[in-house]
Image (cartoon, helix red, strand yellow):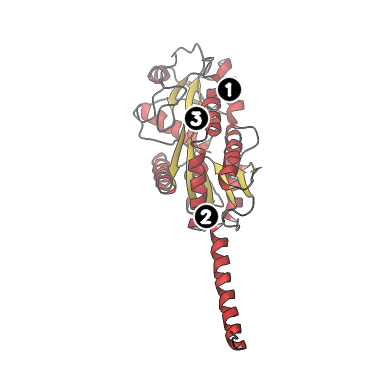
Amino acid sequence: MTYPKKALLTSSVALASLLAVGATAVNADDFPSQPLTMVIGFGAGGSTDIQGRVLANVLEEELGQPVNVVNQPGAGMGVALTRLTNNTDDGYTFLYGPSSPLTFAPLAMETDYELDDFRYVGAVSLAQAGFVTGENRPFGDSWEELVEYARENPGVSYATQTAQDRLIIDYIAEQEGLDLRIVPTEGGAGMAPLILSGDVDFAYSGGTHSGYADSGEMPVLLSLAADRLVAFPDAPTLVEAGYDITPGDILMAVLPHDVSDERAERLAEALEAATQDERFIEVTEERLLLPVQYMNEEELTDTLYEQRDAFAALIEEMGGVEE
């Protein structure tokens, strides 16, 4: 059968339109179709970096594309978060790290980002911060005994690392009527020698104490997580000790706020699968002594805003944050 040229042209245009629509649909659904970048806002070799690199390996298999890890330390993850606010690749770059640089830092200092600037795709683990002490202290390894001892002995020394832990200890000192001597330190590497040598009485630890779980050289007095710590189950939580604070850091994946739902959901699916992968479970629970726990975007986002509001109320109550 012979068709008129005009009919052939119309059919060709229609076919081309259908193909274009089909191609658009495929392109919209084939994320990721190129390598992704996981930004870690801390230096190589730390617990977030160790965990993040194993997570990246698992995500590669789940997503079918390489996941390249880029360390971008600075300003307590602030540099990496600022970079993410300016990212425009619609989901190909995401950040992995703890929640406090988002729930606390913008309240305590000037930042180039706010909690509203991102979407929180999913959490895979919980941090295990705590107040720690050393061996052979006159108050043993009991928080109640430490408080009693500190009341009777003004000038008990506390090693602080962050504005957040300083706010918490100032609040506790005010509640308990304690006169503490505050000793600034930088990171676990600065804190540990002071605790182990006995130069300070107790300290904040973001996770360094996990390395001493077997030796017993750094007992935990109080858990700063929502629950008791995996490796130190005898240490009560802040709430159990009578303080209405739950500052526990959540380890999570973060995207710019305007990333499409389809792409965010694809990454979320891969994150949830990673929490069931033996490699991720092993490095998290056995090496880093952190609990694996998945939280979806809705639950995670609600939790972050609750924490932010609680920090804001605490800062107001305390009249600001110590520099």
State which mark lies toward you, 1 or 2: 2
State which mark lies toward you, 3 or 1: 3
**Which labelled disc corresponds to residue 290?**
3
Q: Amino acid at mark 1?
A: Ala
Q: Amino acid at mark 3?
A: Leu
Residue receiving disc 2:
263
Q: Disc 1 on helix, strand or loop?
A: helix
Residue receiving disc 1:
192
Query: Does residue 213 lie above or below 84 as drawn?
Result: above
Residue at the spot 46% in from the left edge and 12% down from the top edge: 138
**Which labelled disc corresponds to residue 245?**
none
Query: Does residue 10 lie above or below 296 as drawn?
Result: below
Q: Which tag, 3 or 2, sits closer to the chain's start?
A: 2
Q: Disc 3 on helix, strand or loop?
A: loop
Q: Where is residue 212 drawn, in percent x and y?
A: 54, 19
Residue at the spot 55% in from the left edge and 16% down from the top edge: 198
Q: Residues within 10 Å of mark 3 (few under 14, many from 20)?
A: many
Nearer to the camera, 250 or 66 = 66
The answer for how far apart the CA atoms under marks 3 and 2 are is 28 Å
Q: Amino acid at mark 2?
A: Arg
Q: Where is residue 309 drawn, in percent x and y?
A: 40, 46
Q: Which tag, 1 or 2, sits closer to the chain's start?
A: 1
Q: Disc 2 on helix, strand or loop?
A: helix
Q: Residues within 10 Å of mark 2 (few under 14, many from 20)?
A: some
Give the quarter of the figure containing the N terminus. bottom right
Residue 95 visible in rendering: yes
State which mark lies toward you, 3 or 2: 2
The answer for how far apart the CA atoms under marks 3 and 1 are is 19 Å
Q: Where is residue 71 drawn, in percent x and y?
A: 65, 41
